Amino acid sequence: MPTYRTVRSALTVAALSGTLTLGLTSAANAVPPNIPDTDTAKNQLSELTVQPDGSMDGYDRDKFPHWSPADGSCDTRETVLKRDGDGVQVGDDCYPTSGSWTSAYDGGTWTDPSDVDIDHMVPLANAWRTGASAWTTDKREQFANDLSDPQLIAVTDDVNQEKGDQSPDLWKPPEQGYWCDYSKSWIAVKHKWQLTINEAEKGGLEEMLGTC
């Protein structure tokens, strides 16, 4: 049965535009950049170091400064909201005043930016225990604000919170049609930043790559 929130969103979107509906068919054209093709992703996966995750000792999100200035007066979050939304208009402070966002993770469409999270494809805590604990703060800031790779994506906030810091063996997007791009994006980020994966994580990635 649809939740109140889903029904609320559908009614709001329909009232505003008369055209948008729940589902991936209403997604904006903008997608995270540099998602590799399937063969490249498979090669990148084979090049990743497979080993048990490290410790969470010392982890703090503040060690990954995020939502840094990115585009004029806009920070990284606001830049992704503009990139991933449809018909987005912003005020002088870069906060969206109109637009809609369709979450690739679950197909939900939202018109209130407060219903949208900017997800780190590879969560900060996962990065910490797979190599980022040894990085400088400057490098961790670059990782947390990476706009040149598929590391940041606008998605439904509740779904992002369900994901938390889980790797692909423990959490996959509810929208199975996105499993292919999700796995390719995760692999691309880990490969670029030379982060490790564990055996179960590799198996989860291989399962999703099998849907490509």
Image (cartoon, rainbow, N blue to C red):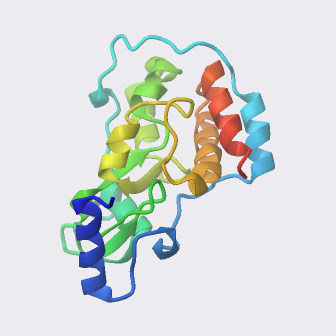
* Total number of numbered discs in the rendering: 0
Q: Position of residue 13 (x, y in %)?
A: 29, 78
What residue is at 62 percent from the left and 22 percent from the top?
200
Q: Residue at x 40, y 71 (%)?
A: 22
Q: Residue furthest front?
A: 1
**162 above or below 29?**
above
Along the viewing direction, whichever of 174 and 91 lies nearer the viewer? 174
Q: Which residue lies most toward the bottom here?
A: 18
Q: Is residue 43 left or right of residue 109?
A: right
Q: Is residue 90 left or right of residue 138?
A: left
Asked whether the viewer can see residue 140, the reply is yes
Residue at image point 51% right, 74% down? 25
Q: Is residue 197 visible?
A: no
Residue nearest the observer in this picture, 123 or 164 = 164
Please say if 208 is above or below 75. Answer: above
Based on the displayed image, in which of its 4 quarters is residue 199 positioned? Answer: top right
- Asked if residue 179 lies left or right of residue 115, the reply is right
Residue 144 placement (x, y as % from top left): 41, 40
Name the image quarter holding the N terminus. bottom left
Q: Where residue 28 appears, x then y in whole percent?
A: 47, 73
Q: Position of residue 21 (x, y in %)?
A: 39, 77
Q: Residue at x 38, y 28 (%)?
A: 137
Relative to 21, residue 32 above or below: above
